[in-house]
Amino acid sequence: MKTAVVAVLGGLLTLAGIALLVLPGPGFVLIAAGLAVLATRFSWAQKPLDYAKDKAQEGVEEVAKSPWRAAGAVLAALVLVALGVLALAGVDLPFMNAFTAVVLILSGLFLVGTVVFARRQEKLEQARAHRPAGERGTAGAYRAAPHGN
């Protein structure tokens, strides 16, 4: 019974994520969630889950490295949130209902959170890279001094 529930839930999440790749919403997140659910019972789901994780990490790294991409992503997120709020406020927008509006708002907020996380990670990486060798770093770690010093 558990296997059937996992198969149905994981399959539905994955299919919803695939649909949201072309519709407004967090498509990759739902695909990864669906694959993660499926991977708990089906070993074949681990390989596409690893691929999805790698692609998600690459996307986060790209946004982190480019302030222009980060700004564009935040702008897109604000547009999604604004459209969702307008739809919930009663503005008649094509192809919109309350569910779509909520999904747009959540997608926009998720995107902003992802950009903030990515930018913070990039700043931490830059700070670690510029820390002089032999100085105490975060979490009690030390960078090794280069040979010859």
Image: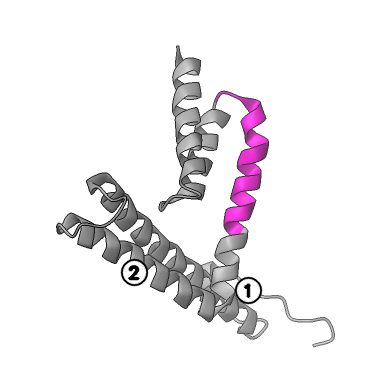
Q: Residue at x 54, y 72 (%)?
A: 64
Image x and y of residue 53, in percent: 59, 49
Dot 2: what SS?
A: helix
Residue 59 screen position, x and y as percent: 58, 62
Asked whether the beta carbons under mark 1 and mark 2 sit within 8 Å of each other, the answer is no
Q: Provide the residue designation for mark 2.
A: 78
The answer to whether residue 37 is left or right of residue 49 is left
Numbered disc 1: secondary structure: loop
Q: Quadrant of residue 85?
A: bottom left
Q: Is residue 33 above or below residue 62?
A: above
Quadrant including the N terminus: top left
Residue at 57% across, 55% down: 56
- The amino acid type of the residue labelled 2 equals Leu
Q: Is residue 10 left or right of residue 146?
A: left
Q: How is the image coloured?
A: one colour
Q: Which mark is residue 142?
A: 1
- Taking the spot 50% from the left edge, 32% from the top edge, the residue there is 37
Residue situated furthest left in the rendering: 90
Give, as a single range, the part of the protein colored magenta.
41-57
**Label 1 or label 2, whichever comes before in sequence order:** 2
**Nearer the viewer's eye, disc 1 or disc 2?**
2
Residue depicted at x 45% and y 30%: 12
Q: Magenta span has 43?
A: yes
Q: Answer whether residue 25 is magenta in the image.
A: no
* Residue 27 image point, x, y percent: 48, 48
Q: Residues within 10 Å of mark 1 (few under 14, many from 20)?
A: some
| Mark number displayed over residue 3 | none
Near mark 2 (Cα within 10 A), the count class, few <14, some 14-19 or many ≥20, is some
